Image (tube, grey):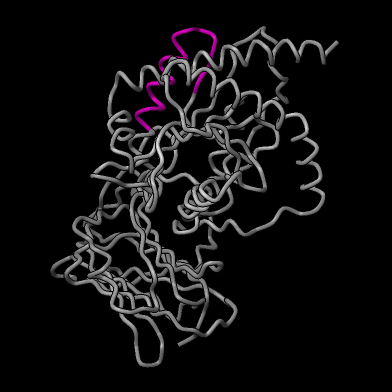
Amino acid sequence: MRKFGIIVAFIVLSAWLGGADAQGLQALARLEARDSAITARMSGDVDVVLKLTQAVPYRVFTLRKPARLVMDFREVRFDGLQKTKLIHTDLVRDLRYGLFRPGWSRMVLLLKHPMSIYSAIMETDKSAGDARIRVRLTRDLSPVTGGTGTTGATGNTTGDLGDRSASRDIWALPDPVKTPRPKTRPTGDRPVVVALDPGHGGIDPGAEYQGQSEANLMLTLAREVKERLVRTGRYRVFLTRNEDVFLSLQGRISRAREGGADVLISLHADALARGTASGTTVYTLSKVASNAAAAYLAASHERGDLLAGVDLNRQDDAVASVLMDLARTETMPRSKKLAAALVSGIGRAMGRLRARPRLSAGFSVLKAPDIPSVLIESGFMSNPADLSNLMNKAWRARFADGLLAALDAWSLKDAAQARLLRR
């Protein structure tokens, strides 16, 4: 059998679907954990066997730095799955799964060392209608020479989906974005456009504590902040994500830019495994973290992208880096002034912030060179008082009031400066 490192395999749905449009279906299948396993062979190869209640379209591929196997499915539910019972080899270090995008689920295996895909097939029981996906990984890193596919039930193949006329590959490069005319900096003659970014989501729930997830808490907070800002008529506000779905860090910046954001505010609420922390903290971008805790939090936020299969290791080319640094000469001072305003506004509204409420770290979501950006750790879920506050609607309302006051103060001064620059 031919070895290959990356394979794209789409499985055609069984005939009983009657040609229904797969894009309109939800939760096509469920993973049966009892009949699924991840094991190793004596040769060092890894076998991944996933039992599904029915055949669904899927694809698998590998990534490096860190080494991962990524498996995407036309929506599969993972009810009752426990990774400790699924993984039976130390060659797989971790596992993450969940909703990746509307209608699609993702499972990511964090591997001990780089591996390539030796084979990937789906076997379907024609009588019962269920299916097994079998993926075999090998240490051999031979270059990719092609792709194969199988339908399981119907016996047709999709190859590497090179025929775009028959089926559009939703993971192909997107169509060129129709970008509007370049935006000008607000001068007070229009509403300020605010992008609120609820951290994490979907396959990446963020911090989890006492049955609560950072992704859900921040989505609730962002929706309430949006409502508070919009009611003033002074702001046009949109969320980078408005449901529990995964969005990469670079994708969040792209959403902000596509929406014409004048400012990007990312909302988080972390949990510390060791030590104690409480209160609200406002971060701006810096290559050097303010302290060890800031560096840890930045790394933990990046981890969601890495485990979800998004590679953050590609570097900007030299020309792009210079241009972005030039753009940041204007946006970085504006970001710092916004951070100062947020510390003041939220502090007055809440009456309590962290001992050091302003910090800096290398958060990827703050790296938009053309948009003033801040990240707010609204509290620490590992602190009982902070967690209680985050779940309290009255507390969230005061937080929104403080954020509004900060934006009002910052936007007035920022617009006045912009008018001076235009003269």
- Name the residue located 46 percent from the left edge and 33 percent from the top edge: 267
- Name the residue located 52 percent from the left edge and 31 percent from the top edge: 357
Taking depth in this image into account, of 52 and 250 the one nearest to the observer is 250
Above or below, comparing residue 169 to residue 108 in the picture: above
Above or below, comparing residue 89 to residue 291 in the picture: below
413 to the left or right of 227: right
Taking depth in this image into account, of 231 and 159 the one nearest to the observer is 231
Image quadrant holding the C terminus, namely top right
26 to the left or right of 60: left
Magenta-drawn stretch contains 229:
yes
The tally of labels here is: 0
Q: Give percent across and percent down for residue 243.
A: 36, 35
Q: Does any portion of residue 240 appear in the rendered image?
A: no
Q: Give percent across and percent down for residue 34.
A: 16, 69
Main SS class of the magenta portion in the image:
helix
Image quadrant holding the N terminus, namely bottom left
Q: Residue furthest bottom?
A: 42
First to last magenta residue range? 219-237
Above or below, comparing residue 79 to residue 337 in the picture: below
Q: Give percent across and percent down for residue 101.
A: 40, 46
- Name the residue located 47 percent from the left edge and 44 percent from the top edge: 247
- Which of the 4 quarters of the picture holds residue 332? top right
Q: Give percent across and percent down for residue 2.
A: 49, 85
- Name the residue located 75 percent from the left edge and 41 percent from the top edge: 324
Taking depth in this image into account, of 80 and 210 the one nearest to the observer is 210
Q: Residue furthest front?
A: 355
- Which of the 4 quarters of the picture holds residue 184? top right
Magenta-drawn stretch contains 410:
no
